[in-house]
Image (cartoon, helix red, strand yellow):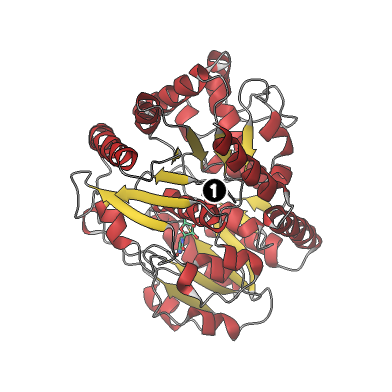
Amino acid sequence: MSHNHNFLIVTYPLQGHINPALQFAKRLVTMGAHVTFTTTIYLHRRLINKPTIPNLSFAAFSDGYDDGYNSNAIVDLSTYMLELSSRGSEFLRNIILSAKHGNHPFTCLAYTLLLPWAANVARELQLPYALLWIQAATVFDIYYYYLHEHGDYITNKSKDATCNIELPGLSFSLKSRDLPSFLQASNIYTFILSSMKEQFRILDEETNPIVLVNTVDEFELESVRAIDDKIKMIPIGPLIPSAYLDGKDLTDTSFGGDVIRVDSEDYIEWLDSKDESSVVYVSFGSFSVLPKKQMEEFARALLDSGLNFLWVIREKKVDEKKEDDELSCKEELEKNVNGKIVKWCSQVEVLSHSSVGCFVTHCGWNSTTESLVSGVPMVAFPQWTDQSTNAKLIEDVWKCGVRMDNNRDEEGIVKADEIRRCLELVIGGGEKGEELKRNAEKWKSLGREAVKEGGSSDKNLKSFLHHIGSI
Ligand code: UDP
């Protein structure tokens, strides 16, 4: 690539934001760009296997919590976001100006969700910028409609669980439970919506705002185009390690950069010892913490099912330990020869392993796309934010999984029987399971084709670079 691209990337300090942003950085580098990847000092320190490839450098700023920010209190979180905004803006201003006065000015700033202040800094310094939307295009549409003329319509409909919510450009209707949790009637995270509003206000002010989306055109054909006349989305996903998509050697970490990876576990050997498509992989991402009662029901279901399972149970941080979290069947779980519990794993490696036949997931967008491009059918158990919309896509649009939260008891807990029923549907060898598997295989090949030379995402990324080069 002849143009001298020099990107600055900034991400919100969460694993689910950093992973795709880092993959985006690496793709840009392979296309001849120079990239400076920035996040908070705490997360920066936790990035292990930092790629030491030419043209990708790292810089970090203090959010005031260099030893880690950890609070579930909403008030604290909203204060934190303000702090992040003021410290982050100052950092970006300085780094952009010093590059400008040096001999290698930045040519574009890319930033992830919840950082509208990053766009403001870029505008102030007249630097082209792009939003890297790390959720589904469908979620983008829903927020767009909510924050524009359809706000009241969605709010009113979200109060009645049975209403169909029809949005222009989308042929599937939504129920209240399919909306991102921040738009459901019970939402208490109003400051997240304020941040989204600010984000959309900035995009609305641009003649041709650039929104890169971590999706694949073929996954979300309608959603990508639903608001085409207002904002053109550019699908460039799935932002998953290229080594994995290309089927290259995953032990080659020269292009690595995973966060908080535990290499010492022997789960890959364990998976090697299991039959093809026989293992249920269970993980609820890097953030969600399920109530102990719910974990007990999962344990019961997995043990009673007799199925092989690999279950990620993250270690809780000290101030997350509100209750004694030792499961009553801990001993039974440990002795169970069919199951393995790990604190963390390299999820893309696990999902691509031929023994894995089902993924019980909280439907984080990264987990969802990782599963799609691995051809693994899912049992969807969404918790909050965009996960319920992703679960809708999994069950009703892509038809490669079943949603499990249909039957809850009065405390909101899904019982072991219901969990087993879903597991058996997906991996029990019946007709439904076969259909889900066939569909999952279809998405796998479409997802992989998209990033190959000449595939839809590859072409989109190239024309984005061309566009930036022409500004
Ligand atoms: N992940 C992982 N190992 C685990 C659990 C999660 O590597 O044991 C990765 C997973 O592959 C994904 C990310 O953590 O890339 C989680 O992102 P997602 O959007 O699915 O959920 P979030 O953590 O943001 O809720």
Please name the residue shown 78% across and 64% down the image: 430
Residue 174, compared with residue 347, is above or below; it is above
22 displayed left or right of 358: left
> Does the beta carbon of the residue at mark 1 sit less than 8 Å from ligand 1?
yes
x, y percent for residue 20:
50, 52
Residue 43 visible? The answer is yes
x, y percent for residue 256:
46, 67
Q: Nearer the viewer, residue 359 or 40?
A: 40
Residue 234, compared with residue 156, is above or below; it is below
Q: Residue furthest front?
A: 103
Where's the C terminus, which quadrant? top right
Judging by the rendered image, the residue that carries numbered circle 1 is 365
95 displayed left or right of 35: left
Q: Quadrant of residue 212?
A: top right
- Mark 1 Cα within 10 Å, few/some/many (few <14, many 20+)? many
Please name the residue shown 38% across and 24% down the image: 194
200 displayed left or right of 137: left
Residue 246, compared with residue 232, is above or below; it is below
Amino acid beneath label 1: Trp
Q: Nearer the viewer, residue 296 or 396?
A: 396
SS of the residue at dot 1? helix
